[in-house]
Image: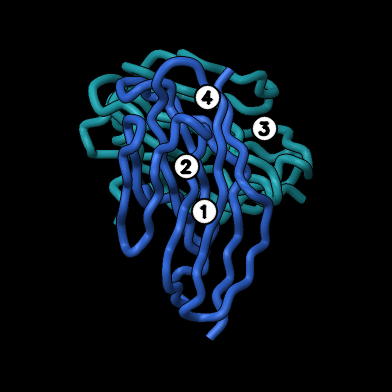
Chain colours: A cyan, B blue
Amino acid sequence: ETGVTQTPRHLVMGMTNKKSLKCEQHLGHNAMYWYKQSAKKPLELMFVYSLEERVENNSVPSRFSPECPNSSHLFLHLHTLQPEDSALYLCASSQASGQGAASYTFGSGTRLTVV
Amino acid sequence: GNSVTQMEGPVTLSEEAFLTINCTYTATGYPSLFWYVQYPGEGLQLLLKATKADDKGSNKGFEATYRKETTSFHLEKGSVQVSDSAVYFCALSASSNDYKLSFGAGTTVTVRA
């Protein structure tokens, strides 16, 4: 148990579907992140939320829509995806200050396949 | 900007062999440095960290020393096991208080019995 739980673990969706990825942490962290991990590429930071406000959006296409309703939950809403969006999507949380990056905790990820 | 470069894999070793994964960084100021490990089917886990020059991080037999003069943070283990097969990521944050991490591309290590 890593302290950060992601559901579902696996998702197969068609290009016209709408789905959501969920991330939950009960570590008392106040920053949450979405990363995309594709084969043979560096981890791509997609979104950063600090104190429930989006503080970073790294040129992510609008077909990915994040939502952070509170400090414990983070969602990634997906619609009209493309096959190249198939990847492992990782959620992480940390303290926004103090220990900072040293407190980073990752979830196990959602393996997304777009068909 | 801040960035991390680590050696490309894959790396294949026999059990009890010596492992080194090179990592160099570019950063202004005084970054903190990290190694993360990702076992098959799992997310990333913090393996070790160092927050200032000459610090040595260590865990599970792995070590890495923060070398400011060579801007490096190479990961080493003296005798690997099959269970060390994983993807290893070098990462940095701009300071010990900064919450943002920059990751390297990852190095896949396979240890054969």
Residue for badge 2: B73
Q: Secondary structure at mark 2?
A: loop
User: Tag 4: Cα neighbours inside 10 Å, few (<14), some, or many (≥20)?
Assistant: many
Residue for badge 4: A47
Residue B28 or residue A14, whichever sits in front: B28
Instruction: Read off the chain for label 1.
Output: B
The residue located at (46%, 24%) in the rendering is A67
Residue B32 or residue A61, whichever sits in front: B32
| Position of the N terminus of chain B by quadrant | top right
Is residue A9 visible in the rendered structure shown here? yes
Q: Are marks 2 and 1 on the same chain?
A: yes
Q: Secondary structure at mark 1?
A: strand
Which amino acid type is shown beneath numbered disc 4? Phe
The residue located at (23%, 22%) in the rendering is A98
Q: Are marks 1 and 3 on the same chain?
A: no
The earlier-in-sequence mark between 2 and 1 is 2
- Closer to the observer: label 2 or label 4? 2
Residue for badge 3: A79
Which amino acid type is shown beneath numbered disc 3? His
Q: Secondary structure at mark 3?
A: strand
Find out whether the residues at labels 2 and 3 contact each other: C-beta distance under 8 Å.
no
Q: Gap between marks 2 and 3, in whole Å?
A: 40 Å
Q: Gap between marks 1 and 4, in whole Å?
A: 23 Å
Q: Gap between marks 2 and 1, in whole Å?
A: 13 Å
Which amino acid type is shown beneath numbered disc 1? Tyr
